[in-house]
């Protein structure tokens, strides 16, 4: 008989299952405390459950955690973790320590269908969806788990293309009855897959980051095939009609490619597109990938682009590049050379 997997279940689902096994309803709270607060990894240590119940759980259930299979450490403190999924695929997560923050960038799919021209994950093609259990495992099974202050869904895959499992993972992460994380410490990124995006806006209070990269639709289409199905101008319309005043924050990710989207004309067009939206722009210098026509701009261009936007009232930050030496930087995640 297949064992019941506890990680990734809604508190209600766990309660129903426990009661069906003859355990009291309050065992749900006890189990959650052991898993998410005390962080034990086997039933034997859950000493406020009776010995008989601990044995029953060990027989019929799995906590559902699995350790990373490989770790790479950058000179800048960034750590890239490789996990094996239940189907045997490999996925990556990146731990990024910085001053008083410790962020984990998690994957939501194995590979990606979206095929963005500048992205190593896109080159892998799509291989599989991750389950909520596999998403949560990335957060809970790394050495630094208890130190994390922020989680970003910006690893492999397009989160809105796996919305059922992503929403389930977010629900477990933020539920008072489970992990109890504040949605303010979680950011989900998307290139703007509308069905998933609409559901996310409706049901989640986590922050949203839209991968924009250029405000010119024809240029965006040439880099990001998804522009055809979900044009950025439509995405902006959806965002304009949404009330972001309640807790959620909106940002735009903009990778700068040398000579292609880093000119004053692009900066002006960006300001026009986002005019009136309460948002922030995060600029990311492109990280060169093999056999790619895209190049990385120099620091002066990045600085000039950022200063122009800020001077025009569009709040803009330049994101520091992290983990480039271990292929953990933005757009470089790919398990093609896993373990090397
Ligand atoms: S940039 Fe994001 S959406 Fe595009 S291919 Fe890469 S992982 Fe997929």
Image (cartoon, rainbow, N blue to C red):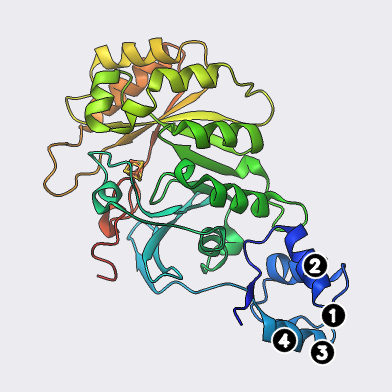
Q: Which residue is mark 2?
A: 28
Tag 2 or tag 4, which sits nearer the N-term?
2
Q: Which mark is residue 1?
A: none
Tag 3 or tag 2, which sits nearer the N-term?
2
Q: Which residue is mark 1?
A: 48
Q: How many marks on residues? A: 4
Q: Is residue 135 left or right of residue 204?
A: left
The residue mark sitting in front, 4 or 2, is 2
The residue mark sitting in front, 2 or 1, is 2
The residue mark sitting in front, 1 or 3, is 3
Q: Which residue is mark 4?
A: 44
Counting from the top left corner in percent of width and height, residue 305 is at: 30, 21
Q: Give how far apart the Cα atoms at labels 4 and 2 are.
A: 16 Å
Residue in view at x 45 percent, y 23 percent: 235
Regarding residue 318, the answer to whether it shows in the image is: yes
Residue in view at x 31 percent, y 26 percent: 228
Q: Give how far apart the Cα atoms at labels 1 and 3 are.
A: 11 Å
Q: Which residue is mark 3?
A: 52
């Amino acid at each position: 008989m297949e064992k019941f997997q506890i990680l990734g279940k809604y508190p209600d689902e766990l309660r129903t299952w426990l009661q069906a096994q003859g355990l009291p309803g309050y065992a749900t709270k006890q189990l959650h405390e052991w898993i998410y607060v005390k962080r034990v990894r086997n039933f034997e240590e859950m000493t406020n459950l009776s010995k008989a119940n601990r044995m029953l759980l060990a027989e019929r259930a799995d906590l559902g955690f699995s350790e990373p299979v490989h770790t790479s450490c950058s000179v800048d403190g960034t750590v890239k973790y490789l996990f094996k999924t239940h189907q045997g695929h490999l996925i990556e997560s990146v731990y990024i320590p910085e001053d008083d923050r410790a962020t984990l960038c998690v994957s939501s799919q194995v590979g990606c269908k979206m095929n963005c021209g500048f992205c190593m994950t896109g080159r892998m093609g799509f291989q599989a969806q991750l389950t909520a259990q596999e998403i949560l495992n990335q957060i809970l099974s790394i050495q630094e788990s208890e130190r994390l202050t922020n989680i970003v869904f910006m690893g492999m895959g397009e989160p809105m293309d796996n919305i059922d499992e992503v929403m389930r993972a977010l629900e477990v992460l933020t539920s008072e009855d489970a992990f109890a994380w504040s949605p303010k410490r979680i950011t989900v990124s998307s290139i703007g897959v509308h069905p998933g995006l609409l559901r996310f806006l409706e049901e989640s209070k986590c922050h949203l980051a839209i991968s924009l990269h250029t405000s010119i639709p024809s240029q965006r289409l040439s880099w990001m095939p998804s522009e055809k199905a979900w044009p950025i101008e439509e995405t902006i319309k959806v965002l304009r009609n949404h009330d972001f005043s309640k807790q959620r924050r909106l940002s735009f990710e903009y990778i700068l490619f040398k000579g292609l989207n880093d000119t004053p004309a692009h900066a002006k067009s960006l300001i026009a597109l986002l005019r009136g939206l309460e948002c922030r722009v995060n600029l990311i210098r492109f990280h060169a990938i093999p056999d790619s026509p895209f190049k990385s701009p120099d620091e002066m261009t990045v600085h000039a682009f950022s200063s122009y936007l800020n001077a025009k009232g569009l709040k803009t930050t330049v994101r520091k590049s992290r983990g480039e030496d271990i292929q953990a930087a933005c757009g470089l995640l790919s398990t093609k050379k896993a373990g090397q």
